[in-house]
Image: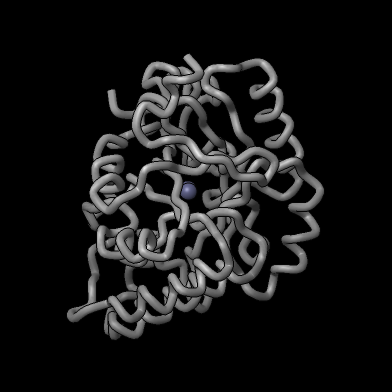
């Protein structure tokens, strides 16, 4: 089982309004796969939109943190980390920083789900793609991703090429756009998530694609793994495929986070030494 010894840092909980299962169900699945660590990273309350089907409410955040910390205290295999997935919204950085500083997160994941207020990865908003120039849309997305890397709030960038989710891809090479974005990510020293969630979407491909990941490797940008599970059955899903592509582009280790400090786990037989 190629998930053995790995981490899955992108798990949701029922609190977000669009995920299923109890925390314990996610843990059981992870243990069965032999994952050495999992991190819950539920959606941080959206400050700019109130929608209970997108995230927990702000007053639920203390309960979420308590619930995950209690679980972490009870469970040793796999180790449980406390994360949170926060939408990058430029105007909210100061407010977000103040809230996040109050909690003992192991890592804070940054996501770009909104471009100029448009929730482009929400199937309810597919209309927004109509008539768009896809090249400039991708250009904008990767600029905003670079902004997210530089804003100082995030340890990790989730599903870095999420803009491909519905399979709308521009013609022509994206290389220059990727390079400009990744130069900023490298300078900001932020970790990139390799997410198997894209395989379950029309994109049909890991986030990020192999070309993007190669450019990460060239810049020594550290990576870690996530499934973006919204159901216990999705924990660690397709991780053997993620490991395959990571090894192919030359990665040998992945990041583990504790209290916002990094350490590295070998990609191959990562958990062996501790067993
Ligand atoms: Zn979600
Ligand atoms: Zn997510």
Q: Residue furthest left?
A: 171
Q: Is residue 15 visible?
A: yes
Percent across and percent down for residue 228 are 43, 43
Q: Which residue occupies the foreground of this view, 246 or 144?
A: 246
- Colour scheme of the rendered structure: one colour
Q: Which residue occupies the foreground of this view, 145 or 182?
A: 182
For the point 73% across and 31% down, the residue is 66
Percent across and percent down for residue 138 are 35, 77
Q: Which residue occupies the foreground of this view, 255 or 232?
A: 255
Q: Which residue occupies the foreground of this view, 95 or 30?
A: 30
Q: Is residue 124 visible?
A: no
**210 relative to 102 in the view: left or right:** left
Is 258 drawn above or below residue 271 in the view shown? below
**145 relative to 108 in the view: left or right:** left
For the point 29% across and 28% down, the residue is 2
For the point 65% across and 22% down, the residue is 71
Percent across and percent down for residue 27 are 50, 22
**212 relative to 156 in the view: left or right:** left
Examine the image and state in which quarter residue 128 appears.
Answer: bottom left
Is 200 drawn above or below residue 218 in the view shown? above
**40 relative to 64 in the view: left or right:** left
**Quadrant holding the N terminus:** top left
For the point 42% across and 79% down, the residue is 180
Counting labels gives: 0
């Amino acid at each position: 089982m190629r998930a053995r010894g790995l981490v899955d840092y992108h798990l949701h909980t029922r609190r977000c309004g669009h995920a299923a299962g109890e925390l314990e169900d996610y843990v059981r699945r992870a243990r069965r796969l032999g994952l050495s660590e999992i991190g819950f990273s539920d959606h941080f309350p959206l400050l700019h939109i109130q929608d209970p089907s997108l995230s927990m409410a702000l007053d639920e955040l203390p309960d979420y943190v308590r619930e995950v910390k209690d679980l972490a205290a009870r469970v040793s295999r796999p180790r449980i980390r406390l994360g949170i997935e926060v939408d990058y919204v430029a105007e909210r950085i100061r407010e977000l920083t103040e809230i996040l500083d109050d909690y003992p997160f192991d890592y804070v994941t940054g996501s770009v789900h909104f471009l100029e207020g448009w929730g482009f990865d929400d199937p309810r908003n597919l209309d927004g793609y109509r008539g768009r120039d896809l090249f400039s849309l991708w250009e904008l997305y990767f600029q905003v991703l670079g902004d997210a890397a530089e804003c100082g709030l995030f340890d990790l960038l989730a599903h870095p090429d999420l803009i491909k989710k519905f399979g709308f891809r521009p013609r022509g090479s994206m290389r220059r756009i990727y390079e400009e974005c990744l130069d900023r990510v490298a300078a900001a020293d932020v970790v990139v998530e390799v997410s198997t969630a894209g395989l379950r979407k029309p994109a049909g491909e890991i986030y990020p694609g192999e070309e993007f990941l190669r450019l990460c490797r060239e810049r020594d940008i550290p990576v870690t793994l996530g499934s973006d599970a919204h159901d216990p059955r999705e924990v660690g899903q397709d991780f053997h495929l993620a490991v395959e592509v990571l090894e192919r582009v030359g990665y040998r280790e992945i990041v583990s986070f504790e209290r916002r400090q990094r350490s590295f786990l070998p990609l191959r037989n990562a958990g062996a030494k501790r067993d």
